[in-house]
Image (tube, grey):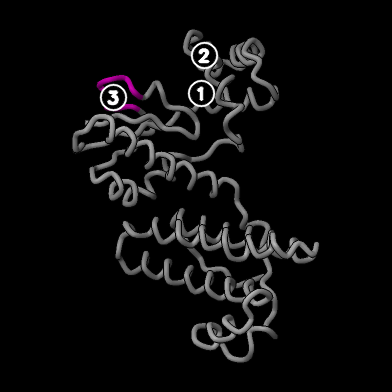
Amino acid sequence: HETVPQVTKPINKWMIAQVNMRIKEATEALEGFQTRKALQDSFFLFKKDIDHFFYRIEHESEDENAMREIADVMVYVLGIWIRLMVPFVPHGCEELWEKHCGSGLVSTTEWPKYNIELIDEKVQKGEEIVHGLSQDINEIKKVISIKPEKIHVYVAPEWKWKLFDIANKIGKPDIGKIMQEAIKQNVHDNKKEIAEFAKKIGREMTKIKYIGKIDEYSTLNNSIEFLSGEADAQVIIYDKPTYDPQGKSRNAMPYKPAIYIE
């Protein structure tokens, strides 16, 4: 396997997951003589991932550890990307390899290997949540037409995740069965709230790819610099709604936190 940098930031973990996914897909495409698909994975989709990575790290802290992580990830990405592109632009890759990476010819260097354990759906879903939240905040800002000072973000409580797990196991949005199993497991004291949320699940399960619970609180807190920078306001993440003057936290769903702007 490739030497993978040790990272702690979610966006760096996401980039590493994307790199390994692109290696896997490009390799499988070439082995199946799907040259067009291999080019799409090696160049167009990979470039889209890198563009997103650069966009995300704009607001990252400039402390030494954060900068070192980013630099390590970029070196890792570049070494792999050049090798993936060799079948398509060999001369350009040789020039890049000589300038940035190593000795010898890149065309005789070993093809990149992916690590299936690094293609982490939860890491990828976490980045999707961060990006979606940033977009939702900006959409709300457009509607209210004022510059907010604070943005309060509420993640879904444990009982809502349990209800999603129940619905996922049932396999279809059967509200009656979801209710029955939720009451049996005593996931929440308020049966009215269970019923209301079970109805929402029926709509949401058809829209999202549910992969299980994610620690949204930690994921969002670890991306707070990006969220605050994009929103141009202080962003506060709550795992419990200790401050919620308009009761917005009741709207929080797994993968879709609730927002209150003031």
Kindly identify which numbered label has been placed on residue 125: none
- What type is the residue that disc 1 sits on? Trp
Please name the residue shown 51% across and 17% down the image. 197
Q: Disc 3 marks which amino acid?
A: Asp
Write the start and end of the magenta stretch as one range.
Answer: 241-248
What separation in Å lies between label 1 and label 3 (alpha carbons)? 19 Å
Q: Earlier in the sequence, mark 1 or mark 2?
A: 1
Disc 2 crowd rating (10 Å Cα; few below 14, some 14-19, many 20+) is: many
Q: Could you tell me residue 149's position as x and y percent?
A: 19, 38
Q: Are marks 1 and 2 in contact (CB under 8 Å)?
A: yes
Quadrant where the image shows the N terminus: bottom right
**For the residue carrying disc 1, how many other residues have a C-alpha within 10 Å: few (<14), some (14-19), or many (20+)?**
some
> Where does label 3 land, which residue?
244
Q: Which residue is mark 2?
A: 194
Q: Position of residue 206 (x, y in %)?
A: 61, 27
Relative depth, front residue between 204 and 115: 204
Against 109, is 152 above or below? above
Label 3's element? loop
Residue toward you, 61 or 15: 15
In what quadrant of the picture does the C terminus appear?
Answer: top left
Q: Give the residue type at disc 2.
A: Ile
Label 2 sits on a secondary structure element that is helix
Per the image, the residue denoted by label 1 is 159
Q: Position of residue 122 (x, y in %)?
A: 56, 45
Residue 246 inside the magenta-drawn segment:
yes
Tell me the residue at 58%/65% (across/down): 43
